[in-house]
Image (cartoon, rainbow, N blue to C red):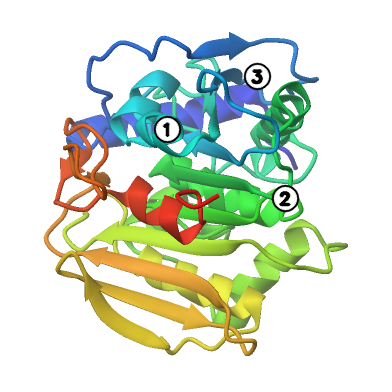
Amino acid sequence: MTPTRAAHHRIAAALATLLVALGLGLYAPGRAAAASLQEVTGFGTNPGALRMFRYVPDGLPAGRPVVVALHGCTQNAAGYGTGAGWLQLADRWKFSVVLPQQQTANNASSCFDWFQTGDVQRGQGEAASVAQMVDRHLADVGGDASRVYVTGLSAGGAMTAVMMAAYPDRFAAGGIVAGLPYGCAQAAGSPYVCMYVGATQTPRQWGDRVRAADPGHPGPWPKLTVFQGTADYTVKPVNMTDLVEQWTDVQGADQTADVSDTVGGYPHRVYRASSGAAVVETYSITGMGHGQPVDPGSGQAQCGTAGAYLLDVDLCAAYRMGTAWGLDSA
C-alpha cells in the first residue's frame, strides 16, 4: 500500500523529533544564493510536490554535463549547492546544476522521503519529480543527456541511491555522501534501524532491490562514489559497506577492492568490473562525523565552504566526484 501524505508527515515528524533530540539535524549555514540561481516552475506533473532550482553559468554552451545535487535534512537547495562546492565547480568547469528542494509540507524537516515506498519508485512521488526536473533542464539548456550525474548528502544521499536505481537510464554516475543503499528502510523494516544498525541483506539481495526498481533496464548501470565518516553516528558506516555490496552486485563485480590506497590521507578503495572499468569507489574519512567533506580555498583541488554539516577535512568530496566523472576535462 502506498502511504498517504498524512502518513508521510507522521513518520517524518517522528524522525525529525528523534534527530533534533539527538542533536543530529542538518542545518544549512546562512549564505546568500548564487546570483544566477533561479527557480523553475511548471517542470512536469511534479507528483512529489518538490521545488526546482538550477544554476547555469553565464555563457554556458549547449552539450555540457549536468549535476543534480540533493540537499540534506533542514537544508535548502541554494545553501547546499554553494556550501558543498558544486556551484563553484560549475563556474570553473562549465557545467550546470539542478537543485531539487524539499518542502516542509511533505516532510517536517525538509528531508527527501527516501524511506517512503511511494516516493522511491519509478514514476511515483519525489523520484518522479526529480526525473521530471532533469528532463525539463536538459530541454531548456541543451545539456548532454549522456552525462547527467546525481549526488547528495544524508537524506539527499539516500535519494541519490533512489534515483540511480529507479532511473538508471538518466544517470551516468552517482555520488552518495553519508547516505544509504536503495531499499534500506524497507529491508530493515524502519528508517531508524537502517540508519543506526543497517539491514541484513546479502549482496545479491541488495542488488535485487535495485534490479526490481526498473526491471526492464538492460544496463549499463550508473557508477557509484561513496564518502562516509568513520565517526558518523547519524548514518552508521555499515551503510557504506552495504552500498558497496549493492552496487558491486548490480555491476557484476566482486566485493574485493582492486585498488586500496589513500587519498588526502584517507582510505580509498576502487572496485572494478570484469571489463576493468571502475564501477564503485569509496572514501572513508577517518574521524569525520555526519556531513559533507569540504576543503575551502583557492587551490586546484579545493572547494566548498565550512559550516554546520559541511566539514573541513582537507578533502572536497565534490571535487573528487567531479574528477572521477571527468567534469574537469570535458
Which residue corresponds to the image point at 54% horizontal and 39% vertical from the top-left? 67
In the picture, the disc for residue 53 is none
Q: Which residue was labeled with disc 2?
A: 146
Secondary structure found at label 1: loop
Judge whether 29 appears above or below 180 on screen: above
Is 36 on the left-hand or right-hand side of 260? right
Image disc number at residue 49: 3
Q: Secondary structure at mark 2?
A: loop
Measuring from the top left, give residue 194's x and y in whole percent.
42, 57
- Farthest residue, direction left: 287
Q: Measuring 17% from the left and 38% from the top, which residue is drawn there?
A: 296
The tag on residue 71 is 1
Residue 108: percent from the left, percent from the top? 43, 21
- Dot placed on the residue nearer the N-terminal end, 2 or 1: 1
Q: For the residue marked with disc 1, what is the amino acid?
A: His
**Disc 2 residue type?**
Ser
Are the residues tagged 2 and 1 within 8 Å (C-beta)?
no
Q: CA distance from mark 1 to mark 3?
A: 16 Å
Q: Horizontally, is 311 left or right of 246 in the view? A: left
In the figure, 179 relative to 11: above or below? below
Q: Is residue 101 above or below residue 131?
A: above
Going from N to C along the chain, the mark reached first, 1 or 3, is 3
The foreground one among 188 and 78 is: 78
CA distance for labels 2 and 1: 23 Å
Observer-side mark, 2 or 3, equals 2
> Badge 1, how many Cα within 10 Å: few under 14, some, many 20+?
many
